[in-house]
Amino acid sequence: MTDVSAGTLAEMLDERQHLLEIALWMFGSESTADRIVQETYRRWYALDDEERAGIAVPRAWLTRVAGGICLELLAAPGPLPGPGTAEAPSPAAAPAPRPQPARRPAHQQARPDRAMLVRHDRVARRFAAACDLGDTAALRAVLAADAIVVSDGGGKLRAPVRPTYGADAVARFVTSLLAGRPGTEVAVESVNGRTGLVLRQAGRAVAVVGVSVAETEITAVWIVLNPDKLQRWHRP
């Protein structure tokens, strides 16, 4: 199933900034504002598919929810409960750690074959060029027929909820997500030891893209949008 209802990356980032500005205006604290925005998105994801589909203007809904959370905090001061908070198990209930196999010496550990890395680099750069141009046909040409794309917003961005399957759907998804990104720099960099993409605005990473390659085709696209996971990718 294709889920591009979240809009383009530029739209998602603008939406998140809009919500942060509302919370900052109310409280003046970046940490509190970030928690308010996270709680806002938690409530969005708590809706079922039918409820989300029935919201004509998600940004307006999110704005109302963020404002409501601010009013809740003002009316009853106290820490904002974090999403998914659960009581930690007692030490007695914690499972015993499993014995770990001995690590092989570094010189004996498996290393990616150089020819495979070169092939991955070549395919990933074709993908990067197509992304930079917003060329759906070129993207489709480099994707395997059963390709998949998975995005991770970490509940801090209104990213698509489900994986997207199939070369045509993946190509449309990627061009839709990365379209309309004024002021965004697209850099080809090492991602988890292999060639990938990093998108930045004013030096701040807004997305990191990794790909899985088989022969000359991309079988999977992994897009990280979660702001918490992007901090180490920022550049001065």
Image (cartoon, grey):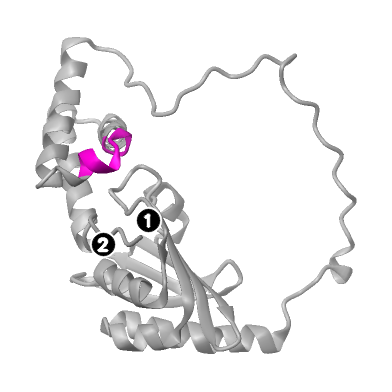
Badge 1 marks a residue whose secondary structure is loop
**Residue 89: % across, % down:** 63, 18
Magenta portion: prevailing SS class: helix
Q: In the rendered structure, does residue 50 fall within the stretch colored magenta?
A: yes
Which residue of the protein is positioned furthest toward the top in this rendering? 76
Q: In the rendered structure, does residue 46 fall within the stretch colored magenta?
A: yes
- The disc placed on residue 132 is none
- The disc placed on residue 9 is 2
The CA span between labels 2 and 1 is 9 Å
Drawn side of residue 4 relative to residue 217, left or right: left
**Residue 40: % across, % down:** 25, 34
- Tell me what residue is drawn at x 19 percent, y 30 percent: 28
Drawn side of residue 125 relative to residue 170, left or right: right
Three-letter code, disc 2: Leu
- Tell me what residue is drawn at x 31 percent, y 69 percent: 173
**Residue 217: % across, % down:** 52, 84
Quadrant of res 236: bottom left
Q: Earlier in the sequence, mark 2 or mark 1?
A: 2
Quadrant location of the N terminus? bottom left
Quadrant of res 186: bottom left
Three-letter code, disc 1: Leu
- Tell me what residue is drawn at x 46 percent, y 80 percent: 145
Badge 2 marks a residue whose secondary structure is helix
The answer to whether residue 98 is above or below residue 101 is: above
Per the image, the residue denoted by label 1 is 225
Q: Residues in magenta?
A: 44-52
Q: Are marks 2 and 1 in contact (CB under 8 Å)?
A: yes
**Residue 180: % across, % down:** 18, 71
Residue toward you, 95 or 29 = 95
